[in-house]
Amino acid sequence: MGRLVILNALPLNAFGAGEFMLRVRRVGFGELPALAGAHGSVIHYVRHRATVSLLSKYLPLNPSLNPDKYEVGDTLLVVVLKSPQRGQEVDTLTEGDVELFLVSLV
């Protein structure tokens, strides 16, 4: 049982050197509780308060301050704003404001 790691971007250099393959699919908020239950732990690297507040309605969130290398077995949940507001802080978000992508190493 791997970790569910929540990110606000997908940094490809975090996978280390060499070749790797990713599987990506969109997911809905209704799938998040089952995803959390299917993984040993849920950690996040998201610092945006409105995003954390929205996700915490669906997931038990444990912040991580130490970036890790990702491993086979980890599942990544990448959370992105549908309409980013550059230079502006967004105080509240709804499910309709973000897209969720589930990414796993294969």
Image (cartoon, rainbow, N blue to C red):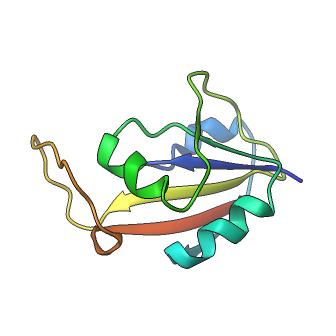
Q: Quadrant of residue 61?
A: top right
Q: Position of residue 13 (x, y in %)?
A: 58, 38
- Could you tell whether 67 is left or right of 46 in the image? right
Q: Residue 103 at what x, y percent from top left?
A: 63, 62
Q: Nearer the viewer, residue 1 or 37?
A: 37
Q: In this orientation, does residue 70 appear?
A: yes
Q: Which quadrant, please, contains the C terminus?
A: bottom right
Q: Residue furthest top?
A: 66
The residue sitting at 80% across, 55% down in the picture is 39
Where does residue 62 sit, x and y in percent of width and height? 61, 37
Q: How many marks?
A: 0
Compared with residue 5, is residue 103 higher up or lower down, i.e. above or below?
below
Q: Is residue 105 visible?
A: no
Please state which of residues 65 and 53 is positioned toward the viewer in this rendering: 53
Q: Nearer the viewer, residue 104 or 16?
A: 104
Q: Is residue 30 left or right of residue 50?
A: right
Against 14, is 4 above or below? below
Relative side of 58 to 93, left or right: right
The residue sitting at 48% across, 67% down in the picture is: 100
Of all residues shown, which one is farthest toward the front? 57
Residue at the spot x=48%, y=59% of the render? 57
Q: Which quarter shows the N terminus?
A: bottom right
The extreme left residue here reads: 88
Residue 91 image offset from top left, x and y in percent: 19, 48
Quarter residue 31 falls in: bottom right
**Residue lying at 83% horizontally and 49% vertically, measured from the top left:** 40
Q: Residue furthest right?
A: 1
Residue 58 vertical placement versus 13 (above, below): below
Q: Is residue 97 above or below residue 89?
A: below
